[in-house]
Image (cartoon, grey):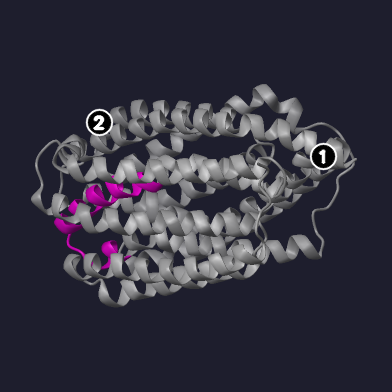
Amino acid sequence: MNNDSSNSNGRRAGGLLQTGIVFSAISFVTGLGNMAFQGVMARHLKEQGQYGNANSALNALMPLLSLLPSIATFAVAHYIAHFNARGDSARLQGLLSGCRKFLFHLTIAGSALAVLAVKPLSIFFHYSPALMLTTLVCTLLTLWTSLAGALCQGLAWFKRLALIGLLAMLLRVAFGWFVTLKWPSPETAVLASTFALLAYLVLLVWKRELTMHSEAVSPWNREFVHYLVVSATCVGGGYFFTQGDLLVAKKFFTGAENDAYNCAERLAIALPITVSPLLTVLFTSRSGARSGSIVGDQLKLLGLYLLGLAFGATALFILRDFCVKLILGRSSPEAEAMIAPLAVTMIFVALLQALALWALASRWMKISLLYGVLGVGYWLALLVRGQSPTGLLQTMPVAAGIAFGLLVVIWFITLRRHKPAIPG
């Protein structure tokens, strides 16, 4: 039985790097298309503050309203990956059925929570009533596609997910160009991103694989509840590290300052986003197997992640003027000046994400909890000290660096206690 497990690990290890590279390559092309959408918005939303408001609603308010279902889908993806890696087909099909019911009920609860939370959040962060309502409707639609995404990730359908992302990008750019040209407003820009969710209809092609009839197996047990709680802190921490700054900018910055900040922030956040497919593959793989020959490929994926991050940061710094012109269609000294501190921050954030996901997949629960606490502390520091562009940009790299320093020390201490066995 151990030999079978070892052979299974070997087969998975053989395709792990290839899967990660293919997923990343397709996602990179998708990322370029999403940058084109940024260019479309910046050129069509010409009134001061419109571009920043649209970006903030899409990339800060909408994910915040979706946080509860995001936590559940994250935990379910891990749980499904665990049984998928073991090759237990009967148990897996029952679990898929049980998880679908769980996610369905939680999505309903998340929708109700979004309805209740949207108005107070919009008032606090200064979103207009029209943008608030549009974001709420789009959030409710997005919640249902995240359910399908979690099941696909748990089944390791990375190439299919990458193709769906590519199709969504094409729909987003084409529809976004049309509606923002004819009706230029932050609301139509948000609607364009929601229209792109039609790409998930492609999953109907594989409907049979997702809906095989079997007796539902409830995911609820002590281990799953424990993991759900830790996933909550990990996903929440990730949100505050990567998107919380947009809420701070929306609350305190003028329209022109918010436009410049959102341009620079979209370029900087592209660093972790571009290499994040490698982390997705790594997380799903490590959730199912944490020993044997596959560990070596998991570490290679982590190395590729770091290499891609370093290359991207260098390229962004050198080409910052060109990149800003590509989005805004003109020079912006304000946006260009923001890129360097934002890029440094995002390097720390990307490293924090890598450590947190490795720890979460390895079930090093205390590190995952620490990551969540650090994320909340980081955002509170931005909220207190980031009431101007200068204050925010001075605080971000320092706060992110301190958080990384604390987490990496605890991570290495834990790693020494759970040193992976890597075959020679």
Three-letter amino acid code of the residue under disc 1: Ser
Residue 380 versus residue 81 in the image, above or below:
below
Three-letter amino acid code of the residue under disc 2: Lys
Magenta: main secondary structure: helix
The residue shown at (61%, 34%) is: 16
Quadrant showing the C terminus = top right
Residue 401 versus residue 323 in the image, above or below:
below
Question: Residue placed farthest to the top in the image?
Answer: 205
Horizontal and vertical percent position of residue 107: 63, 52
Label total for image: 2
Secondary structure category for the residue under label 1: helix
Secondary structure category for the residue under label 2: helix
The residue that mark 2 highlights is 182
Horizontal and vertical percent position of residue 236: 51, 63
Horizontal and vertical percent position of residue 109: 64, 58
The residue shown at (61%, 65%) is: 416
The residue that mark 1 highlights is 5
Residue 357 versus residue 395 in the image, above or below:
above
Question: Residue placed farthest to the bottom in the image?
Answer: 384
> Distance of mark 1 from mark 2, alpha carbons?
58 Å
Range drawn in magenta: 248-272
Is residue 254 located in the magenta-colored stretch of the structure? yes
Residue 88 visible, this orientation: no
